[in-house]
Image (cartoon, helix red, strand yellow):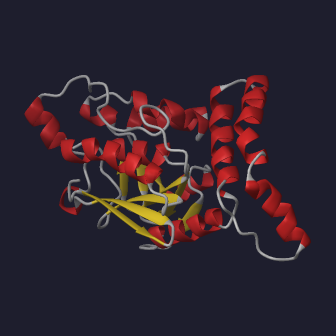
Amino acid sequence: MTNELLYEVSDGIAVITINRPERRNALNRAVREGFFDIWRRFEADAEAQVAILTGAGDNFCAGMDLVEAADTQLRIPPAGFIAVLGDNIEVTKPVIAAVQGYAYAGGWLLSQMCDLCVADETAKFAITEAKVGRGMPWAAPVIHMLPQRILMEVAMTGDPLTAQRAYELGYINRLMPKGQALQGAKELAARLMANAPLTVRAAKEMVRLSTEMGRTAALRASNRAFDAVYLSEDALEGPQSFREKRKPVWKGR
């Protein structure tokens, strides 16, 4: 794995870091291709229950490496250009974005595809493709996260949303002081890990199904998504621990 993409697990949390601070963590080929391996590694890692995606230094990710794009004369990005959770790669465990500084273009994509987002007050989110003559089909799911008129404006102007504005609009789950995005994400991850892991993962699937289907179809699909939860040992452990007035001991099965 490239040293431009780091993976570290501690206390059940996998911290995945884009490590190109000198390029504002822009997405070059090594990072883009490395994401496929790193998400598979996280999904298979029994020690990691939650992932946090962040960037080294003062920025989350400034988007595609435009110098590399100019050198390679990139036009239409090929299939599999970058790993997109819920599209060309599946991760059932929860993923949190920890954002500081720029989350522009592909950087916004990375924060958008995560399940939750924690940002510090320096964060800025922008769909900048209109300013450089590129396309932004990846931004289509943002319509489930921002009002239509807001999405229309940021997509056509390329102007950024401040962290405060993104928080007010509901795009950010937690707004932290400068330099504390990663700490805030770890605190949120700890709250997730206190709960039954199978239920947390099924809740993630339920929300995703609800954004892709109509009401009735989503309800029926969600019922099936929770079958494994109801049949698990944890489904018995929860009520039993409540009865015995103790903390539950989750087994994830």
Residue 211 visible within the image: yes
Q: Which quadrant would residue 109 be assigned to in this image? A: top left
x 55%, y 38%: residue: 150
Q: Residue 19: horizontal and vertical position, in percent?
A: 25, 60
> Quadrant of the rendered structure where residue 49 is?
bottom right
Number of numbered tags placed on the structure image: 0
Q: Position of residue 153 (x, y in %)?
A: 48, 35
Question: Which residue of the protein is positioned furthest toward the left in this rendering?
Answer: 71
Image point 77% across, 45% down: which residue? 231
Q: Is residue 126 visible?
A: no
Of residue 131 and residue 42, the one placed in the foreground of this image is 42
Q: Nearer the viewer, residue 252 or 16?
A: 252
Q: Is residue 156 above or below residue 1?
A: above
Which residue is located at x 14 percent, y 40 percent? 68
Q: Is residue 18 left or right of residue 74?
A: right
Above or below residue 92? Residue 134 is: above
Q: Residue at x 57, y 33 (%)?
A: 143
* Left or right for 169, reference 199: left
Location of residue 247 with respect to 214 vertically, above or below: below
Q: Position of residue 146 (x, y in %)?
A: 58, 40
